[in-house]
Image (cartoon, rainbow, N blue to C red):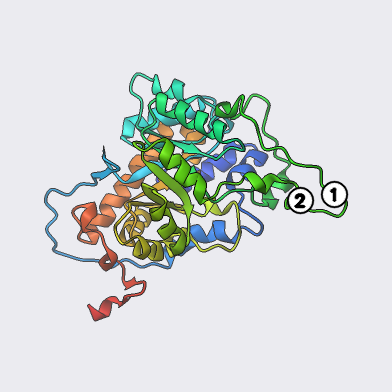
Amino acid sequence: MNSPPPVPLCAQDYADLARARLDPAIWAWLESGSADQLTAQDNQQAYARLKLRSRVLRPLQGAHTRLTLAGQALRHPILIAPSAWHGLVHPEAEQATALAAAATGTLLVLSAQSGTPIETLAALPAPPTIWFQLYAQARPEDTLALAERAIRAGAQALVLTVDAPVNGIRNAEQRSGFRCPPHIRSVHLDGLSPAQARPTPPGGSPLFDSGLLDVAPTWDTVTWLRQQFPQVPLWLKGILDPEDARLAMQHGASGLIVSNHGGRCLDTLPATIEALPAIARAVDGALPILLDGGIRRGSDILKALALGAQAVLIGRPALHALAVGGASGLAHLIQLLRGELEVAMALTGCRTLDEIGPHVLWDKPGHGSAAAD
């Protein structure tokens, strides 16, 4: 008699089960980072280097994980990060993701490369709160049309990804031979005009001499988008440098997402949790900050909030859970992470998210050791 499949108890359990179920090429597409994948690995490993400071006998009555983000009341600080083609891991694709988000009160950032139209998700009987991720298109009118479509469908914010003017070199994905199957496509990009490369001259560069970078977004793109949609929150995803954080404030960003694209663009960038403190100091409370990359435990969420984030986004773990259990699997994962966060809050003496700060870390980066407190 076959034994029943194990019940996932944490995010890593979902990852292990997903790897056993998915085609190896799809797994490589999902998991691979750029080049030697050092940044992708360090996104997770950096959390282990941060130690927590246990506090005892603290009053914990009325504890909760509620917050308000960009004017929206949320049950907890876990968001679903934008990622392409959920149909590669589950037949119900982004509809299953949206159902899980709605059931758990989780904000969904829908990818511009979603395989399911935003209108379909917005028409669900109980849709989640949706933000829409934008990639700036080669033609400004296409960027405008994409944003207007999302807002008409009910997107509550736009999230402009700014750290990927070109794709990273993902050798692990290349070795796998991954090809997106014909039934999966980025439906929001239908009818838009992709950038057209010029013929490469003999001995020339297929990137630098192609003209593709001529249409890459700049800070002027951010200013233009802000002018087009002055009433819609505009978040910038992919901020890692403090100077870029300051420029984002100057150009009208509503909030920042500290991200290195899951380590998928440029290898040997710092882990996002390492980059976060300097970003928080540069912003100094003027803008809300989110973080993605490497979140696998509720204690990781606590550490991110301690160093300046208001909330976090999960990318790969959401797809792992979706692959294993569809909407119910993803809802279960979110509940697991929320439960772990609550335990970590209680054991560090924090009743609310507002009470989480650098003091929960044993060695506070840039502030000396806890022994000095």
Q: CA distance from mark 1 to mark 2?
A: 8 Å
User: Residue 225: horizontal and vertical position, in percent?
Assistant: 46, 40
Residue at point 50%, 24% (across, down): 117
Relative to residue 227, is residue 163 depicted above or below?
below
Horizontal arrangement in the rendering, residue 73 relative to residue 307 (left or right): left
Q: Quadrant of the C terminus?
A: bottom left
Q: Amino acid at mark 2?
A: Asp
Contact between marks 1 and 2 (CB within 8 A): the answer is yes
Which residue is pictured at 17% across the width and 49% down the height? Answer: 63
Task: Return the x and y of residue 138 as percentages of the image width and height.
Answer: 62, 38
| Quadrant in which residue 66 is drawn | top left
Residue tagged 2: 209
Question: Which one is nearer the viewer's eye here, 188 or 268?
Answer: 188
Q: Is residue 265 left or right of residue 53?
A: right
Whether residue 138 is visible to the viewer of this picture, yes or no, is yes
Nearer to me, 184 or 198: 198
Compare residues 77 and 194 and report the one nearer the observer: 194
Secondary structure at badge 2 equals: loop
Q: Which residue is mark 1?
A: 201
Across and down, in percent, residue 332 comes to 37, 37
Residue 362: % across, % down: 31, 71
Q: How many marks?
A: 2
Q: Is residue 5 visible?
A: no
